[in-house]
Amino acid sequence: MAQMNGQGKAGHRVEPAASDSTDVEAGGMTDEAWQAIIGNDASYDGIFFYAVKTTGIFCRPSCKSRVPNQTNVRIFRNARQALEAQFRPCKRCKPDGLRLPDEEWVAQIEQWIEGHYGETLTLGKVAELFHGSPYHLHRTFKRVKGITLAEHIQQTRIGQAMTELRTTARSIMDIAIAVGIPNAAHFATVFQKKTGLTPTQYRERADRAINESDGGMRHESH
């Protein structure tokens, strides 16, 4: 941790980690440091920083953000080391006075959505994960991308559904569940609104296109 030979709250010593940054599972996290994180203890600010691997963000111990899963936490002695490890500063607590540009923040959120679109996602949940208010996230995302976060999530889900319909034999219901729209009727309505076709029509058209392409290649080979 930063200045690992320093003193934590009430004079308690924070034990040194084996390297500049250490994964929790490798033994770099002390109980004292974890208690500082979950307690938002400002007396540890400047002693260490912590980063969350699932979001790519690093914070001060005093950050009022959602408590992370301990196994996803990495500890750094200073902000420079966190930046060198490709983590970005929290927009809420601004570690070491650093401010993450809005464009990078939105890009982080987009990348996270690519791996989590199948989950139940709300503006509030995403804002909490990425250490911002729902209002700020809504306004910033729309300014940067030209669409709202909800619209982006829906586009991502329908795009993935289109891929699944073209390339797999999974049932439409299974695909709807997998992309995070578990109500079949709602999925069909949203899909048709975005593509102009029902999921069944889209799959049939894709199958015809593939068959026609295969037939054309066979004809050319003669």
Image (cartoon, rainbow, N blue to C red):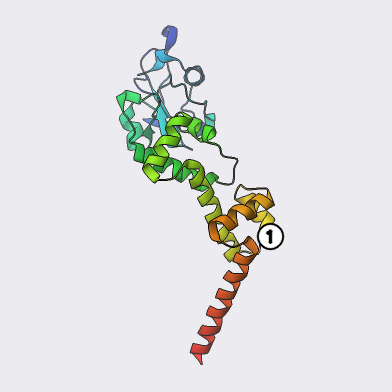
The spot of residue 86 in percent (x, y) is 36, 39
Secondary structure type for disc 1: loop
Q: Could you tell me which residue is drawn at 30 percent across and 24 percent down?
A: 97
The spot of residue 59 in percent (x, y) is 41, 26
The residue closer to the viewer here, 30 or 71, is 71
Q: Quadrant of residue 101?
A: top left
Q: Quadrant of residue 93?
A: top left
The residue closer to the viewer here, 137 or 4, is 137
Asked if 205 appears above or below 139 in the picture, the reply is below
Q: Could you tell me which residue is drawn at 52 percent across and 89 percent down?
A: 219
Q: Residues within 10 Å of mark 1 (few under 14, many from 20)?
A: few
Residue placed under numbered mark 1 in the picture:
171
The spot of residue 78 in percent (x, y) is 33, 26
- The answer to whether residue 36 of the structure is visible from this angle is yes
Label 1 amino acid? Answer: Ser
The spot of residue 130 in percent (x, y) is 46, 33
Please state if 33 lies on the left or on the right of 45 as rendered.
right
Asked if 78 appears above or below 39 in the picture, the reply is below
Asked if 27 appears above or below 178 in the picture, the reply is above
The residue closer to the viewer here, 200 or 6, is 200
Quarter placement of the N terminus? top left
Please state if 22 lies on the left or on the right of 117 as rendered.
left
Q: Could you tell me which residue is drawn at 35 percent across and 25 percent down?
A: 95
Q: Could you tell me which residue is drawn at 62 percent across and 64 percent down?
A: 168
- The answer to whether residue 85 of the structure is visible from this angle is no
In this view, the residue farthest toward the bottom is: 222
The residue closer to the viewer here, 7 or 117, is 117
